[in-house]
Amino acid sequence: MHSSGWLTRRSRTWVLGCFLLGFLVPAVVEFAAKRCDPYKLAVETAYRNPQFIDTLGAPAAEGWFFEEEEHLGNPVRAEMSIPVHGRTRTGTLRVQAIKDGGHWRLTQLALELTKPDESIDLLSGKPL
């Protein structure tokens, strides 16, 4: 009976530890990734575009678990897909950026919407 109580306590500790690792590790990775310069530049640029907020419906926000791919070279390039949602619509920010002279510059920032399918170039403000 004594070992059964130890096993139960150990099992609970193991389950709690797995839960915390399963929740905290992705959250910490996501938090750190959202602080990267291309992500911040893309999101700040999108929010400054009135068409972004008008299309999604205020308040707009980014979702979790975006995709990012960096290509090392000269210049360094980054590509991202950032889920976004607002009061009325959801979509994805498609981002391409290059690091030129130590500074990131967006080469593509498009809001891809679903229902109905639509894509808006947030750098020029025109439909794609």
Image: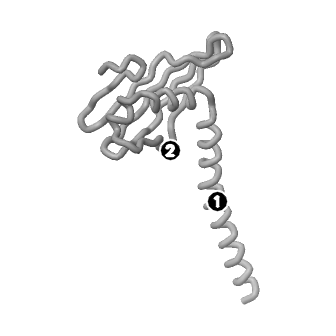
Position above or below: 32 against 98: below
Q: Is residue 77 left or right of residue 51?
A: right
Instruction: Name the N-terminal-most of marks 2 and 1.
Output: 1
Left or right, 122 with reference to 68? left
Q: Amino acid at mark 1?
A: Leu
Labels 2 & 1 near each other (Cβ < 8 A): no
Q: Looking at the image, which residue is at 56% across and 22% down?
A: 78
Q: Nearer the viewer, residue 58 or 100?
A: 58
Residue at mark 1: 20
* Residue sitting at x 59%, y 42%: 30
Residue appearing at x 63%, y 35% in the figure: 35
On screen, residue 15 above or below 48: below
Task: State the residue at coordinates (24%, 35%).
Answer: 116
Q: Quadrant of residue 100?
A: top right
Q: Secondary structure at mark 1?
A: helix
In the rendered structure, find residue 93 and report the number of the disc placed on it: none
- Quadrant of the rendering where the C terminus is positioned: top left
The local secondary structure at tag 2 comes to loop
Give the residue at mark 2: 64
- Give the image location of residue 9, x and y in percent: 70, 77
Q: Is residue 14 left or right of residue 79?
A: right
The kind of residue on which mark 2 rests is Trp
